[in-house]
């Protein structure tokens, strides 16, 4: 890991920058560039932003010789090391440090707004990369824990039963009406339903009385009414007496029977 943070990368270079000596901040309202002597900067030179590992450095150097005038180490942005002013986007306040650890606040400004924009974006991109690196390392630290071993141990086997599943019962077809109809009785015809009048009355009188009796075996309420006479044969005798004598059969003579 030590070899990875040894090299130094250059993030941004601006050839013209002005440095101002600023008064102490009187309140918490922030710095104002209008309080500086903008017409007479205290120093003019080149600004270069470099990065070594996760730390960025703002270096103020001479334009010709490249001699270091001052530098400001930046551990986070935005932060106390770099602050913006409240009345302009082209001026910033830097906290510079020497090799002994002493620090001071100075003001820097750019003549072009584009240079100020590049200065701001270069710092933002660097610390965005730092944040992503920290997230990757934290996720790797979570994954570095003990993992679940799902492999087969020595001598362990597994058995698979293929094609031996239980047969499913076929669903029975259901009628659309929901109720099935019973089949007709074998070897016979279906009897017609009985009439609405269950009391069947046979006409009385004459030789037709009691000759035709049709009873439905399935209907026990059918009643056959006949002549109130208790002797059915009495009707036949009365009907025979009503026949005229000429129509009655003459009795054969006793001689005909003897000849036979």
Image (cartoon, rainbow, N blue to C red):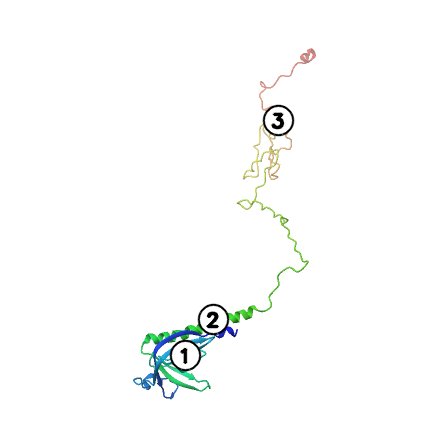
Which quarter of the figure has residue 14?
bottom left
Residues at badges 3 and 2 in contact (C-beta under 8 Å)?
A: no
**Element type at marker 2?**
helix
Give the number of the mark in front: 2 or 1. 1
- Could you say where residue 145 lies in the image, as x and y percent from the top left? 58, 69
Left or right? Give the position of 176 relative to 107.
right
Q: Between residue 120 and residue 86, name the one nearer to us.
A: 120
Point out the tag, 3 or 2, that comes first from the N-terminus.
2
Task: Give the labeled residue for mark 1.
Answer: 58
Q: Between residue 82 and residue 224, name the one nearer to us.
A: 82
Which quarter of the figure has residue 36?
bottom left
Which quarter of the figure has residue 51?
bottom left
Give the number of the mark in front: 3 or 1. 1
Point out the tag, 2 or 1, that comes first from the N-terminus.
1
**Element type at marker 1?**
strand
Q: CA distance from mark 3 to mark 1?
A: 148 Å
Residue 30 is at least partly visible in this image = no
Q: For mark 2, does the 10 Å Cα neighbourhood hold few (<14), some (14 to 19), or many (20 or more) residues? A: few
Say which residue appears at 51% left-offset and 73% top-offset: 3
The label shown at residue 214 is: none
Name of the residue lying farthest toward the top: 259
Q: CA distance from mark 3 to mark 2?
A: 128 Å
Task: Give the labeled residue for mark 3.
Answer: 236
Q: For mark 3, does the 10 Å Cα neighbourhood hold few (<14), some (14 to 19), or many (20 or more) residues? A: some
**Element type at marker 3?**
helix
């Amino acid at each position: 890991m030590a070899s990875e943070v040894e090299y130094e990368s250059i993030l941004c270079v601006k050839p013209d920058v002005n440095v101002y000596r600023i008064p102490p901040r009187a309140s918490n309202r922030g710095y104002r560039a209008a309080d500086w002597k903008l017409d007479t900067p205290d120093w003019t030179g080149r600004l270069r932003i470099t990065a070594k590992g996760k730390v960025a450095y703002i270096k103020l150097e001479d334009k010709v010789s490249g001699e270091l005038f001052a530098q400001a180490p930046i551990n986070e942005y935005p932060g106390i090391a770099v602050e913006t002013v409240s009345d302009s986007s082209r001026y910033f306040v830097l906290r510079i440090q020497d090799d002994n650890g002493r620090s001071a606040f100075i003001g820097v400004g750019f003549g072009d707004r584009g240079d100020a924009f590049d200065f701001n974006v270069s710092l933002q991109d660097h610390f965005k990369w730092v944040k992503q690196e920290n997230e990757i390392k934290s996720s790797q630290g979570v994954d570095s824990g003990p993992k679940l071993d799902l492999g087969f141990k020595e001598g362990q086997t597994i058995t698979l039963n293929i094609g031996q599943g239980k047969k499913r019962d076929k669903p029975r077809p259901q009628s659309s009406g929901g109720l099935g109809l019973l089949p007709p009785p074998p070897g016979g015809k279906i009897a017609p339903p009985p009439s609405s009048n269950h009391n069947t009355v046979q006409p009385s009188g004459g030789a037709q009385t009691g000759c035709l009796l049709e009873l439905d075996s399935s209907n026990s309420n059918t009643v056959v009414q006949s002549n109130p006479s208790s002797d059915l044969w009495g009707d036949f005798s009365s009907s025979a007496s009503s026949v005229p004598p000429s129509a009655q059969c003459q009795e054969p003579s006793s001689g005909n029977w003897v000849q036979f």
